[in-house]
Amino acid sequence: MRAVCEVVVRHQDGDFLLVERSFDKKWFPGDWDTGAGGKVEPGERPRDAAARELLEETGIRAQTLLPLYQHVSAADGCIFYGYLTCVDIPKDAVVLQERECIDYRWVSAQAFAHFVRFELTGDKPRRLIGALESRGIIEPARRNDDGITAF
């Protein structure tokens, strides 16, 4: 199985970073994603790979990386290692890696939670939402009496 790291970036003001993947990417071209990530190189620790990928793709140097999840996907043949980093940087200091990401935006915690639940593609929402809710990083979704999800 190959190892993959994923990093969610939260600003000190509570906003989260979203990045738009390049249209040249093999997987999910042009889709918005919840941060940086990529494969763990042979001999590299997942945490080190996460810090490296974050720096390469966004120019952000992680001071800390909080482990969020470790998920084995037999269907993908991958072990996913998820991390959260909190940053105190100017929001316009993000430097996107050419051919990886083409745009970025900072969104509120509520908008981020909505994106993860309803717009994020692939298997990632299942890995991410429970980890973020259980740590109190985002509010759990609630259903009202009419069965409508509220945040």
Image: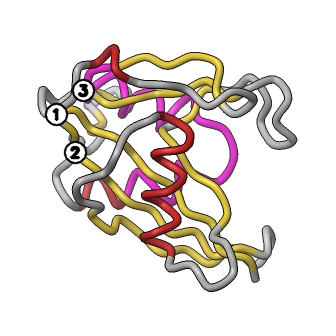
**If the image is split into quadrants, where does the N terminus sit?**
bottom right
Residue 150: x and y in percent read 29, 27
Nearer to the camera, 107 or 39: 39
Provide the residue designation for mark 2: 86
> Residue 63 lies in what quarter of the image?
bottom left
Asked if residue 71 lies left or right of residue 79, the reply is left
The residue depicted at 29 percent of the width and 50 percent of the height is 85
Q: Which residues are magenta?
A: 107-130
> Viewed as shown, does residue 111 lie left or right of 139?
right
Q: Which residue is mark 1?
A: 88
Q: Is residue 128 left or right of residue 21?
A: left
Q: CA distance from mark 1 to mark 2?
A: 7 Å
Return the residue nearer the eye: 71 or 63: 63
Q: Amino acid at mark 3?
A: Asp
Q: Which residue bears the numbered disc 3?
A: 15
> Is label 2 in contact with label 3 (beta carbons under 8 Å)?
no
First in sequence: mark 2 vs mark 3: 3
**In percent of the image, x 53 and y 31: which residue is there?**
118
Q: Above or below — where is 105 with respect to 69?
A: above
The C terminus - image quarter: top left
| CA neighbours of label 1 inside 10 A, class few (<14), some (14 to 19), many (20+) | few
Q: CA distance from mark 2 to mark 3?
A: 10 Å
Look at the numbered discs 1 and 2 and tell me whether their residues touch, using CB distance below 8 Å. Answer: yes
Q: Nearer the viewer, residue 126 or 95?
A: 95
Q: Main secondary structure of the magenta part?
A: helix
| Secondary structure category for the residue under label 3 | loop
